[in-house]
Image (cartoon, helix red, strand yellow):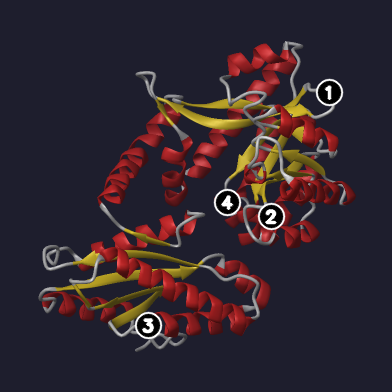
Amino acid sequence: MVDLITCLDPYDIFITKLKNAVDDIGDRIIPIVYSDIKHFKYFNDTYGYKLGDDLIAEFAELVCKDNSYITGARVVSDNIVTAGYVSNKIPRDDMLKHIRQVNDEIEEYLCKKFKCRRISIATGVYFITAESKDINVETAISNANFARKQAKESKDESVIFFDDTMAERINRELDILASIKDALSDKELMPYYQPKVNSITGLIEGAEALVRWRKPDGTFIYPDQFIPAIEKSGQITDVDYYMYEEVFRFIKNRLDNGEPIVPISLNVSRAHLTTLNIIGKIKDLLVKYPIPTEYVEFELTETSCMENPDSARQFIDAMHELGIKVSMDDFGSGYSSLNLLSEIPFDIIKLDRTFLKSKIPESKERIIISSIVTMSRELGMKSLCEGVETEGQSIFLKNIGCNTQQGFLFSKPIPQTEFEALLI
């Protein structure tokens, strides 16, 4: 029975047809093309499920129009995978360029038809050749899907080809997933603190706790090497709760010893917004470590809020009841920031570091950053700018009324002992 929304083959039929195509590959190539629509959940929530189904149907029809098409299936939601024959005489770069052009045309068409400001497609590609025809087809599909996920996370590439580098990355991720549990129990993970500085006084008025993984031999596994893997596996919540307890304990110890402390902000991974179990966990931590809630803050990324706006609001409302402030992190990295600000009661707006591209902000940067800072103030929210690296940037932010600054000009993320030395 065909998929009711897209009229594509059921997945099991797709697999059968793909196996038959591989058996008959000859000297041709079969690109496995795995695509989805970025932020589709937000489209669904904003425009309704009926229009969301219509968008999937149109999307599926368009991606299957290529002359090389053999078979396609809707794997789940808006995830569409297709396969077809291509001549092995066509350079792979040309094939990827063709897929990018097709995606651009589909995006433009869908934007016009559904009256959207922006629709973006993420695509992963894996090539089955005569030399690799013995590969398990489900592994080939999984490889294409892995490349799609990379494209979905990338800000620069919308079409990514699965290659040997990605295979190595998969093996590294498997190693990380196998060792993260022991790393938590052995306390190899630890918070590093990056100060936040008051624009007027130049004094430290807060800090952000960032996870670092130090192996027993003294080497580090940095967040960009392990966070994506544990996010996919769901283990990110365990790491977050570990970090929360470490920071709550740190704050409590400083207060008990009569030592100075500033508010510490903690990151909330998007996985928490699917269940909101995090609210109960935070309440439990406040019982275990009874600290004034003014000393702890939480940060939600713009993207996670965009994907789960209702849950984000519920989380913020619960934190406000506890007296805890919440900031929107990476403001400006997505495409629905203004919408979110009108719907969700953040306390602080953290401007994404990409706004500060010049050592001394140029005219366009000045206009954009100044407008955001002014808007934040008028909405009753404080503003913080990340990625401050030069005196010119800092002076500019001070002059336009940005409340707080954070960046390498003041300090990189540092171990707890070094951070404590700054608080004396």
Whole-number angstrom distance, CA of label 4 to CA of label 1: 34 Å
Badge 2 amino acid: Ala
In the picture of the structure, the residue carrying the numbered disc 2 is 312
Coordinates of residue 281 in the picture (x, y in percent): 63, 41
Mark 3 or 2: in front is 3
Image quadrant containing the N terminus: bottom left
Is residue 288 visible in the rendered structure shown here? yes
User: Which residue corresponds to the image point at 69% horizontal and 55% vertical from the top-left?
Assistant: 312
Where disc 2 sits, the SS reads helix
Whole-number angstrom distance, CA of label 1 to CA of label 2: 32 Å
Q: Earlier in the sequence, mark 4 or mark 1?
A: 1
Image quadrant containing the C terminus: top right
Whole-number angstrom distance, CA of label 2 to CA of label 4: 9 Å
Q: Callout 3 environment at 10 Å: few (<14), some (14 to 19), or many (20+)?
A: many
Dot 3 and dot 4 residues touching (CB under 8 Å): no
Name the foreground residue: 180 vs 80: 80
User: Which residue corresponds to the image point at 42% horizontal and 49% vertical from the top-left?
Assistant: 233
Where disc 4 sits, the SS reads helix
Whole-number angstrom distance, CA of label 3 to CA of label 4: 32 Å
Image-based side of 242 in relation to 176, left or right: right
Q: What is the quadrant of residue 109 in the picture?
A: bottom right
Name the foreground residue: 229 vs 130: 130
> Which disc, if any, is residue 201?
1
Q: Earlier in the sequence, mark 3 or mark 1?
A: 3
Where disc 3 sits, the SS reads loop
Badge 1 amino acid: Thr
